[in-house]
């Protein structure tokens, strides 16, 4: 049926985005990995693996932003 075909297509696309996200994540391209994980979850909200990896990237980006801010403050103090 139409609905079954649509579901199969969404799941296949979701898996392709998830695979791309994992490769980007491993390569350290976190912003793009985040986008791919988000697309994965839009297509398949039940994908718990994608949710866990998405949260890891969000945490890594937040830590990187915090480290960058701390470095900037330290640089200002040195001046």
Image: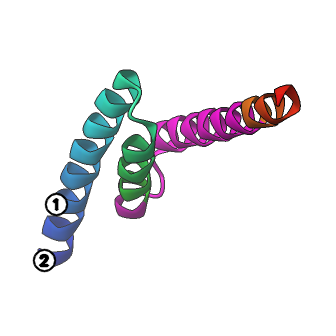
Label 2: few (<14), some (14–19) or many (≥20) C-alpha neighbours in 10 Å: few
Q: Nearer the viewer, mark 2 or mark 1?
A: 1
Write down the quadrant of residue 69 in the picture: top right
Q: Position of residue 2 (x, y in %)?
A: 13, 77
Q: Position of residue 38 (x, y in %)?
A: 44, 55
The region drawn magenta spans 42-69
Question: Magenta span has 75?
Answer: no
Q: Position of residue 65 (x, y in %)?
A: 66, 40
Q: Secondary structure at mark 1?
A: helix
Numbered mark located on residue 2 in the image = 2
Which of the two discs, 2 and 1, labels the residue nearer the N terminus? Answer: 2
Return the residue nearer the eye: 76 or 2.
Answer: 76
Task: Tell me the residue at 69%/33% (across/down).
Answer: 63
Is residue 48 shown left or right of residue 11?
Answer: right
Write down the quadrant of residue 23 in the picture: top left
Task: Give the CA distance from mark 2 to mark 1.
Answer: 11 Å
Q: Secondary structure at mark 2?
A: helix
Return the residue nearer the eye: 13 or 61.
Answer: 61
Numbered mark located on residue 9 in the image = 1
Label 1: few (<14), some (14–19) or many (≥20) C-alpha neighbours in 10 Å: few
Task: Tell me the residue at 41%/27% (across/down).
Answer: 28
Is residue 3 shown left or right of residue 79?
Answer: left
Numbered mark located on residue 23 in the image = none
Q: Residue furthest top?
A: 26
Task: Tell me the residue at 18%/69% (across/down).
Answer: 6
Question: Magenta span has 64?
Answer: yes
Dominant secondary structure, magenta: helix
């Amino acid at each position: 049926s139409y609905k079954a075909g649509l579901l199969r297509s969404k799941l296949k696309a979701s898996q392709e985005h998830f695979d791309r996200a994992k490769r980007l994540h491993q390569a350290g391209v976190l912003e793009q990995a985040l986008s791919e994980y988000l697309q994965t979850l839009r297509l398949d909200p039940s994908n718990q693996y994608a949710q866990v990896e998405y949260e890891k990237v969000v945490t890594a980006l937040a830590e990187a932003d915090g480290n960058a801010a701390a470095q900037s403050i330290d640089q200002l103090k040195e001046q």
